[in-house]
Image (cartoon, helix red, strand yellow):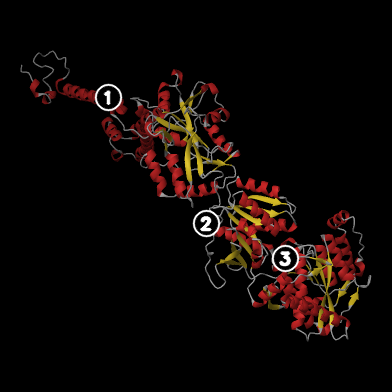
């Protein structure tokens, strides 16, 4: 019964319109052109919606004096649409054109501007991609960038850093894909892969692409394809076990909520846990009535039965038809339905416009399309484009129109209908559950009347309530971690095997850093350490071989003292370094023992110059002073205050200034020589042997960059071997210098620091990092966690555990010299001996002088006087003799 009533109402509306067109003239018929692909479900749906809109509108507005008549043109290609627009403007004299196939390229937009006829586009595209200078083009569908921003906001809220995009390879799919990538980049989300699927893609082609995606680590998939292809994708994803826990699927759709429930349950069962996004349409009684009538009717289109698919675009077409009907009625009083014809040459501006249109039509793009359409043979007269007298008024009324329609509030802003919100829903069972909304002004909110920025709890694939972390390890639940086996420098990595349980235990600085980084990741990861050995338990090779195993996917990550190098980065991805970078050289400290070292602060020429200047000064003072010989000597050797001549005082003061400078320089230089080792750079010659750590990149660096002969290089594996080789020296089968990375040098000097020193420049290297396969989404997660670890106290605790208190393996300064040594008596031995000799000689001279004053020569012939009968006896009373 409902079907017959609806059909009767529809036919009655058509008859009313027809009667009004051909009747007594009390009603004015206004032509509106419609350009659609009636063979597509969307085109058929729009056509049906517009027909129902006219029937519903004029049934409710019987008193209106105008009636819209739809002049529908069925088109298949874009060129057909261009031809249809020109035909409707020139021949049919329409007052407006509506359609999903109305191209908004510059050429067609210019046609609307030339004819002053509004072009209302239902094409799902972004105005930012169209070169529009015409004010006569109205975009009913929202800008693609809004939906792209909504998807990016969802990914950001769930803290996913990498996504994969699957899109349909057509004009609109490519356009939306570019908008989506831009929106993701704005929130710092990386697009790991982009898979384009042709509209005619077969199931095996889709399955191949899904198997490729299954082999990567990213687990978030954004799908933007047609409804039919989307059903195939989810069905094949379920077969490939990609609709299980840990995966996240987000798809875009223009379908209304009842579209999912109308599908076969075998189809929607594979969608379980997917998250969809679509323009929000508020529920209303009118909408429910419309959907009920839609289900019960089958519309005849171009003499064929087409099952029209109801979607939000159908509702926009319905509301647009109402808006046109109301706008035309408002301008009825000034409309007479006539056109004015542009005469050739009468209007300079119009002539210019005609030439411009002709040039646009002959553009390479249009001509190329014409050459591809052999069946189309059309002729366009650009000099006779008709201009509507009422198009501007109709456009102005449309732009000012505001009412509540089936799709919600109808209001044009900047020539475009902007959606009030996008609805985010979760597919559950045969239907869906609303999770929240995205608003252009607010972002994600839980409800339109709530301010919460969190979505409702999502039921993810696999009926899981746990948020997918966004990435995973293919084919296994555990990370396979390769670690090197080291004989020396085991502070970084040490592999031990328990003989009783045969269990492998891996410890060390690098291992503790790795475990601490795992604790700072947002999710928990299972892992297992796999030492880099063969079946017999021996080390398989050098570090380059180990890193190559990561590129070959034998390991998911390599952990250890792995140096970040440019050539390695060509086949693996490294995290940020967690140790200090650089490589340098270590040589033996030359502890020279020299009892005459106190003379070394000044060179011999300076010593001679200072002594000569003192003698010259003495002679000058002697000559300038007055008095006896004794008075001159006293003035010279005592102080400047006893000098009687002002000239001699001035000369003496100048000499004291020079002495002060020499004294300060002497003191500073002597302190440096006695407390700090000599810092002369070690110059490698062809006779020197250099040691390096076996398995390291250092050997190649020494040969390639420092040009050291390969025969002069000797490899070692432990700190003790380094020390023993340095003790022997290069001529005795050892080495003369060590070249290694700074973390190893620190360990070496921490044990033997008093005997060695670091010399020469520091050669750049990036330090130690963890190696991952190319494109691994784990790298940014680990790098961020390493940064947080380095800035925490936990890093200092790990360093102190393996390198001692106060150490700094990742940051901090590193002394270039060994610690200063104490000054011993031997350093001043010559000075003390010389001073003792001078004192003895002075004492002997004093005794001799006093004796001669009192007794004369010690060789006196008077037998009563002995050598001991002198004033010196006062010093030695026990040795006096009597006569």
Dot 1 corresponds to which residue? 833
Residue 398 screen position, x and y as percent: 75, 76
**Front residue (pair 157, 100):** 100
Tag 1's secondary structure? helix
Residue 53 screen position, x and y as percent: 75, 76
Query: Residue 223 appears in which quarter of the rendering?
Result: bottom right
Residue 596 screen position, x and y as percent: 34, 25
Mark 1 or mark 2, which has the lower sequence index?
A: 2
Q: Which mark is residue 34?
A: none
User: How far apart are the two marked residues, 1 and 3, measured between alpha carbons?
Assistant: 114 Å
**Front residue (pair 88, 697):** 88
User: How far apart are the two marked residues, 2 and 3, measured between alpha carbons?
Assistant: 32 Å
Query: Residue 250 appears in which quarter of the rendering?
Result: bottom right
Tag 3's secondary structure? loop
User: How far apart are the two marked residues, 1 and 2, measured between alpha carbons?
Assistant: 91 Å
Mark 2 or mark 3, which has the lower sequence index?
A: 3
């Amino acid at each position: 019964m409902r079907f017959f009533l609806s059909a009767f109402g529809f036919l009655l509306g058509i008859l009313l319109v027809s009667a009004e067109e051909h009747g007594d003239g009390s009603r004015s018929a206004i032509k509106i052109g419609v350009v659609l692909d009636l063979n597509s479900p969307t085109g058929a749906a729009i056509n049906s919606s517009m027909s129902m809109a006219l029937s519903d509108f004029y049934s409710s507005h019987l008193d209106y004096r105008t009636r819209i008549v739809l002049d529908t043109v069925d088109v298949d290609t874009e060129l057909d649409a261009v031809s249809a627009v020109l035909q409707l403007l020139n021949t049919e004299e329409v007052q407006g054109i509506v359609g999903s196939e109305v191209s908004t390229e510059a050429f067609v937009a210019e046609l609307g501007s030339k004819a002053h006829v509004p072009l209302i586009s239902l094409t799902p595209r972004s105005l930012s991609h169209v070169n529009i200078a015409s004010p006569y083009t109205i975009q009913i569908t929202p800008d693609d960038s809004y939906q792209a921003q909504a998807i990016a906001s969802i990914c950001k809220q769930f803290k996913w850093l990498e996504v994969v995009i699957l899109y349909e390879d057509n004009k609109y799919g490519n356009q939306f894909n570019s908008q989506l990538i831009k929106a993701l980049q704005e929130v710092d989300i990386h697009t790991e892969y982009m898979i384009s699927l042709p509209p005619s893609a077969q199931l095996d082609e889709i399955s191949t692409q899904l198997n490729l995606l299954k082999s990567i680590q990213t687990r978030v998939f954004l799908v933007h394809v047609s409804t039919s292809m989307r059903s195939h994708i989810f069905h094949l994803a379920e077969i490939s076990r990609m609709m299980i826990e840990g995966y996240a699927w987000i798809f875009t759709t223009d379908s209304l909520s009842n579209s999912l429930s109308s599908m076969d349950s075998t189809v929607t069962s594979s969608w379980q846990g997917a998250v969809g996004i679509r323009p929000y349409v508020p529920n209303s009684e009118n909408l429910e009535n419309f959907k009920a009538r839609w289900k019960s009717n089958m519309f005849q289109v171009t003499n064929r039965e087409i099952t029209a698919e109801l979607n939000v675009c159908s509702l926009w077409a319905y509301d647009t038809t109402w808006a046109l009907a109301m706008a035309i009625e408002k301008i009825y009083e000034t409309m007479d339905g006539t056109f004015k014809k542009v005469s050739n040459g009468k209007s300079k501006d119009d002539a210019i416009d005609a030439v411009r249109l002709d040039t646009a039509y002959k553009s390479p793009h249009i001509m190329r399309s014409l050459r591809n359409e052999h069946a189309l043979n059309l002729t366009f007269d650009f000099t006779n484009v008709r201009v509507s007298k009422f198009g501007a008024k109709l456009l102005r009324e449309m732009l000012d129109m505001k009412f509540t329609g089936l799709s919600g509030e109808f209001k044009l802003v900047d020539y475009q209908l902007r959606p009030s919100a996008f609805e985010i829903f979760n597919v559950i069972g045969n239907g869906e559950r609303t999770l929240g909304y995205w608003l252009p002004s607010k972002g994600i909110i839980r409800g339109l009347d709530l301010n919460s920025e969190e979505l409702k709890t999502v039921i993810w694939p696999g009926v899981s309530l746990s948020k997918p972390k966004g990435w995973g390890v293919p084919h296994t639940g555990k990370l396979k971690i390769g670690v090197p086996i080291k004989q020396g420098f085991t502070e970084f990595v040490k592999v031990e095997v328990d003989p009783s349980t045969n269990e492998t235990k891996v410890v060390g600085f690098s291992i503790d850093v790795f475990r601490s980084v795992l604790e700072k990741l947002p999710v928990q990861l299972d892992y297992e350490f796999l030492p880099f050995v063969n079946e017999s338990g021996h080390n398989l090779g050098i570090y380059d071989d180990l890193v190559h195993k990561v590129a070959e996917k034998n390991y998911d990550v390599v952990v250890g003292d792995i140096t970040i190098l440019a050539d390695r980065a060509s086949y693996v991805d490294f995290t940020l370094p967690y140790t200090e970078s650089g490589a340098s050289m270590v040589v033996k400290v030359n502890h020279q023992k020299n009892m005459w070292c106190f003379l070394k602060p000044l060179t011999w020429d300076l010593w001679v110059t200072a002594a000569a200047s003192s003698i010259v000064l003495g002679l000058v003072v002697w000559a300038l002073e007055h008095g006896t010989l004794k008075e001159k000597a006293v003035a010279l050797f005592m102080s400047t205050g006893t000098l009687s001549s002002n000239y001699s005082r001035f000369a003496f003061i100048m000499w004291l200034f020079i002495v002060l400078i020499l004294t300060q320089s002497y003191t500073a230089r002597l302190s440096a020589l006695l407390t700090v080792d000599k810092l002369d750079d070690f110059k490698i010659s062809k006779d020197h042997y250099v040691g390096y750590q076996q398995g390291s990149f250092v050997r190649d660096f020494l040969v390639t960059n420092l040009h050291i002969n390969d025969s002069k290089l000797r490899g070692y594996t432990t700190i003790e071997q380094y020390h023993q080789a340095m003790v022997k020296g290069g001529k005795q089968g050892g080495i003369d210098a060590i070249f290694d990375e700074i973390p190893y040098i620190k360990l070496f000097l921490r044990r033997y620091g008093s005997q060695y020193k670091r010399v020469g420049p520091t050669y750049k290297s990036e330090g130690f990092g963890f190696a991952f396969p190319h494109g691994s989404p784990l790298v940014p997660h680990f790098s961020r966690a390493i940064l947080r670890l380095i800035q925490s106290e936990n890093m200092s605790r790990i360093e102190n555990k393996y390198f001692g208190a106060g150490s700094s393996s990742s940051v901090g300064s590193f002394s270039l010299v060994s610690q200063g040594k104490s000054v011993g008596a031997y350093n001043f031995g010559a000075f003390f001996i010389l001073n003792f000799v001078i004192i003895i000689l002075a004492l002997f001279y004093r005794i001799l002088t006093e004796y001669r004053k009192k007794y004369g020569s010690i060789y006196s012939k008077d037998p009563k006087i002995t050598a001991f009968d002198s004033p010196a006896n006062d010093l030695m009373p026990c040795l006096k003799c009597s006569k």
